[in-house]
Each structure stands twice: as C-alpha cells, then as structure tokens.
Amino acid sequence: MMRRRGRPGLVGLAARTAVVAGTATAVSGAVRGHQQDKAQTEYNAQQYEAGQQQAAMNAAAQQAVANQQAYAAAAAPPPSPPGGTDVVAELQKLAALQQAGVLTPEEFAQAKAKLLS
C-alpha cells in the first residue's frame, strides 16, 4: 500500500482535533482550579483580618467600659452613714428647691440649720 503524502486524512484530522481540544480543556481546568485556590486564600485572609479587627474593637470597648466604671466609682458620693442621713445630699436638695423658687431664703436657712444641728 502506498502512503499518502500531503494533507492528513479525515481520521488524522479528527484525532489531531481531539488531542488539541483535550489539552485545552485540561489546561483551562487547571487554570480555573488555581484561580479558585487563590480566591479562597484571599477570602480566608480577609476573614482573619476582619476577625482580628473585631477582637481589637471588642477589647477597646471593654477597656472603655472598665474605665467608665472606675471613673464612676471614684466620682460616686460616699455612702451615707447607717441609720443617718446624707447631710451633703440633703443640702443639695434644699439648694435646688430654693433655686427653683419653692423655698424662700429664710426657709432654706431654717432647714439648713436643722440639718446641721
């Protein structure tokens, strides 16, 4: 049999096309896999960073609450003696009543004298 020279036959052309298509499919699948891996790695890094930022914000909020509570405890008036009245608080109430016009200066002076005696 004589071998043909020149253009390949129909079977050779189909075989070559199948090899090229198979190679292209394999390469595109590998590229897509690498792109997905890269995207997943970037997503994981972003999630980790967001978690770190959230933890830092939570720590700062807890510190602010602790500072506020410490400030409030330091600024709180001393507790009143057991069984007695808080003279300073009572004087402040009387002064507020006088400023509001409920008590006259004479009534304020009498109530103040009564508290202090």
Image (tube, helix red, strand yellow):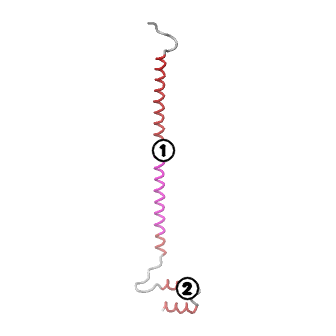
Q: In percent of the image, x 48 and y 65: which residue is there?
A: 64
Which residue type does callout 2 highlight?
Leu
Q: How far across and down, in percent of the image, does residue 60 sit?
A: 48, 61
Which residue type does callout 1 highlight?
Glu
Question: Where residue 97 is drawn, which disc sits there?
Answer: 2
Specify which label sits upstream in the sequence, 2 or 1.
1
Question: Where residue 94 is drawn, which disc sits there?
Answer: none
User: Is residue 12 shown above or below 60?
Assistant: above
Q: In percent of the image, x 40 and y 86: which residue is there?
A: 83
Q: Which residues are magenta?
A: 39-68
Q: Nearer the viewer, residue 78 or 38?
A: 38
Secondary structure found at label 1: helix
User: Is residue 101 shown above or below 51?
Assistant: below
Q: Are marks 2 and 1 in contact (CB under 8 Å)?
A: no
Residue furthest to the left = 82
Q: Which residue is mark 1?
A: 42
User: Is residue 60 shown above or below 44?
Assistant: below
Q: Residues within 10 Å of mark 2 (few under 14, many from 20)?
A: some
Residue 56: say if magenta: yes
- Tell me if 85 is positioned left or right of 108 in this view: left
Total numbered labels placed on residues in the image: 2
User: Is residue 83 shown above or below 22?
Assistant: below
Q: How far across and down, in percent of the image, does residue 98 sit?
A: 57, 87
Q: In percent of the image, x 44 and y 6: which residue is there?
A: 1
Residue furthest to the top = 1
Secondary structure found at label 2: helix
Q: How far across and down, in percent of the image, does residue 82 sit?
A: 40, 84
The secondary structure making up most of the magenta span is helix
Residue 34: say if magenta: no
Residue furthest to the front = 10
Q: In percent of the image, x 46 and y 84: which residue is there?
A: 86
Q: Nearer the viewer, residue 3 or 51?
A: 3
